[in-house]
């Protein structure tokens, strides 16, 4: 019971989110460096390119499809797993209860569950990059028709695009749970003498963002099921 209390404590969950965001930003920046290297030396032969991506970099030369898949993964990681995960998952968990005068988030175990769901989404996203047929190359926005036609569109638009969609769906579920937790914490766990209009501006930022996330990510999940 004590171990469970520690791992579901909002400080512990904040640290887990921080390390996930740190791994994500390092991965995203590494992919960004590969993209920029290719732009400067488009015909350069790099041996480990072929080792990592035998079909995407034959003889060590990066193909346009591989470049697009790297761009897709870079954008997806930075937008979803860094710019979304770090402010809401890390800093909201770390600071929000203290600023509200609370000792814990409203639903500690749900809070920890939201992290692990987000971590699974990140693993599935990386799997989409190394699966058979190559990674998705529809960009991090995944606009149709490129993302909707399937494998006939080209390399990476089969299993790679499907895993990308599954990853975003899982991420949205984790974000929905996190948003519910933040909203419930603001409404139910504030100090008795603290009115809504007495909250610090940072609490209002997370509160409004959680409401927007609850409205938007639910729609995204439904659209991914189509």
Image (cartoon, grey):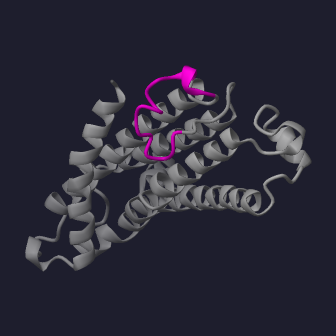
- Residue sitting nearer the eye, 181 or 34: 34
Query: Quick one: which residue is furthest to the top in this view?
Result: 152
Query: Which of 136 and 222 lies nearest the eye of the viewer?
Result: 136
Residue 10 point in image, percent of width and height: 40, 60
Question: Is 68 a magenta residue?
Answer: no
Residue at the far front in the pictured view: 43
Q: Residue at x 53, y 62 (%)?
A: 18
Residue 32 percent location from the top left of the image: 66, 60
Magenta span main SS: loop
Q: Is 204 left, or right, of 41 in this rendering? A: left
Residue 78 in view of the camera: yes
Residue 62 versus residue 105: which sits nearer the camera? 62
The region drawn magenta spans 138-154
- Which residue is found at the position 48% from the left and 59% from the top? 12
Q: In the rendered view, tell whether residue 81 sits above or below residue 97.
A: above
Q: From this viewpoint, is residue 106 visible?
A: no
Quarter location, residue 136: top right
Above or below residue 151? Residue 103 is: below
Residue 72: percent from left, percent from top:
56, 46
The answer to whether 226 is drawn above or below residue 30 in the figure is above
- Residue at 67 percent across and 55 percent down: it is 31
Which quarter of the figure is the N terminus placed in?
A: top left
């Amino acid at each position: 019971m004590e171990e469970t209390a520690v791992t579901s404590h909002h400080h512990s969950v904040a640290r887990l989110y921080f390390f996930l965001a740190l791994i994500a930003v390092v991965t995203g920046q590494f992919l960004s460096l590969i993209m920029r290297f290719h732009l400067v030396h488009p015909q350069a032969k790099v041996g480990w390119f072929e080792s990592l991506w035998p079909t995407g970099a034959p003889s060590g030369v990066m193909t346009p499809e591989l470049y697009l898949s790297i761009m897709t993964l870079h954008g997806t990681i930075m937008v979803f797993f860094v710019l979304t995960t770090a402010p809401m998952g890390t800093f909201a968990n770390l600071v929000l209860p203290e600023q509200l005068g609370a000792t814990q988030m409203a639903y500690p175990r749900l809070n920890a569950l939201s992290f692990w769901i987000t971590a699974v989404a990140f693993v599935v996203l990386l799997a989409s990059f190394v699966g058979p047929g190559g990674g998705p190359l529809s960009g991090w926005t995944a606009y149709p028709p490129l993302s909707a036609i399937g494998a006939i569109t080209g390399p990476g638009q089969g299993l790679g695009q499907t895993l990308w969609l599954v990853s975003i769906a899982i991420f949205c579920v984790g974000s929905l749970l996190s948003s519910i937790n933040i909203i419930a914490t603001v409404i139910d766990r504030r100090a008795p003498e603290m009115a809504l209009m007495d909250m610090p501006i940072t609490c209002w930022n997370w509160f409004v963002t959680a409401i927007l996330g609850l409205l938007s990510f639910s729609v995204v999940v439904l659209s991914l099921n189509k």
